[in-house]
Image (tube, rainbow, N blue to C red):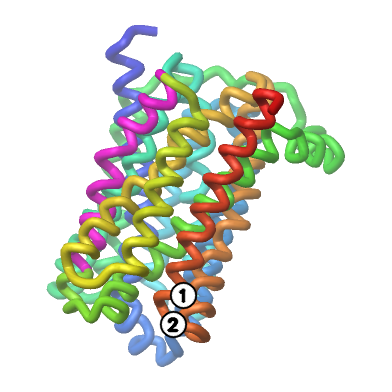
Amino acid sequence: MNWSYRNTVLVLCTFAFFVTVTARLVISPVVPDIVETFSVSTGAVGLALSGMWAAYALSQFPSGLLGDRFGERPIILTAIGGTAVASALLALSPTYVAFLVFAIVLGGAAGLHYSVATTLLTRLFDRTGRAIGIHVSGAPIAGLAAPVLAALAADRYGWRAAIAVGTAVAIPIVAVFALRTRPTEPRYPDRRMREQVDPSLLSQLLTRPSVAYTTALCAMGAFTWQATASFLPTFLAVGYDLPRTTAGLLFSLYFLVNGGVQPLVGSLSDRYSRDAAAAVTMTAGLIGFAVLVIGDGLATAVAGVACVGVAMTWGAPLQSRFMDVLSSSERGLGFGLVRTAYMTLGATGSVAVGMTADLFGWMVAFGLLATIMALALVTIVSNAVFSLGY
């Protein structure tokens, strides 16, 4: 496999990830307009969005099975194409019930991409940390672009146009991906999917010490990521009494730092160790959230947000670690399974932090995130100590 083709696939997978994230992020800025159109509560729209994220998490596992059976390329194309169609249906929703259903469909379609794309990149690259780090950067790039694109579309054409941005960005990517990538050989074309969904075998995989350890770290990372993505702007506006525009700019800084540092952290995990790179990210999170909780003023907020941006690059070393501990025959099924497991657990971050903020205030809520980062760091250090036999 020549170098240029491998990197073409890497770039296209990154853009595909950008598409699946953008399609979900363009909804949040227009929630008030959706509430008004359908005459429902904000909680009702929140239920639709929760359904979308749950479907995204749950589709990770079957995507791995489908990739093994049919090859990664058709599944990635289905994910991008499905995202385009679901975004269009969501934008055209005539009723709230239709909006709820299409939001769930969007989450399920978008969720087919990541696990399969990661498996494909692992087949193409020896330095998986760097490749995964670049691939993951599609999410923070979407975090920078989606709010801007949604605001421009909504101001000019209304909220439906904002959601249709997901379709607009997906169509050219699915076309280019179809034209520029080669068919991928299925790993197990004759293996029946039903045979792989054996609860005892899946349980054995998840409880394997190396897998369980990595899954636990990812669950803690996903918990903090979900809560940060949901509430960082509100925390800055309420906790620091910053103007909404300033809080929004700092949220953009978070995504900018996150996207810029992802490839570096991935490369560090290739050169040194997965756990060492993960420890750097958890340390940054502990410092960042602690600074945000203890500090005061714009300068402190900037420093804290930058550290949190570094912290949320944990995916590059930890997802690479999964690829290290899973055999080649397990990667398609196994990575999808652990993604579903840790993302489902991590999805509780928004609920837990939101309830904590309601009961005890935003400083205590973000102090909880610092505690989670500290727990993850202690877990990594303890694993290193026990591995050395101390």
The quadrant holding residue 68 is: top right
Secondary structure under tag 2 reads loop
Q: Position of residue 375 (x, y in %)?
A: 57, 52
Magenta segment range? Answer: 248-271
Q: Mark 1 points at which residue?
A: 364
Q: Which of 388 and 125 is in front in this view?
A: 388
Q: How crowded is mark 2: few (under 14 residues within 10 Å), some or many (20 or more)?
A: some
- Magenta span has 249? yes
Please tell me which residue is depicted at 73% across the width and 34% down the height of the picture.
209
The quadrant holding residue 335 is: top right
Farthest residue to the right: give it: 200
Residue 149 is tagged as none
Q: Which of 146 and 153 is in front in this view?
A: 146
Q: Position of residue 356 (x, y in %)?
A: 52, 78
Above/below status of 360 relative to 310: below
Q: Where is residue 130 in the image (x, y as percent from the top left)?
A: 37, 25
Measured in 3D between alpha carbons, the distance from the residue under mark 2 to the one under mark 1, in whole angstroms, is 6 Å
Count how many numbered circles sit on residues in the image. Answer: 2
The kind of residue tagged 2 is Gly
Q: Which of 262 and 122 is in front in this view?
A: 262
Left or right of residue 88, residue 48 in this image: right
Q: Mark 2 points at which residue?
A: 361
The quarter of the image holding the N terminus is top left
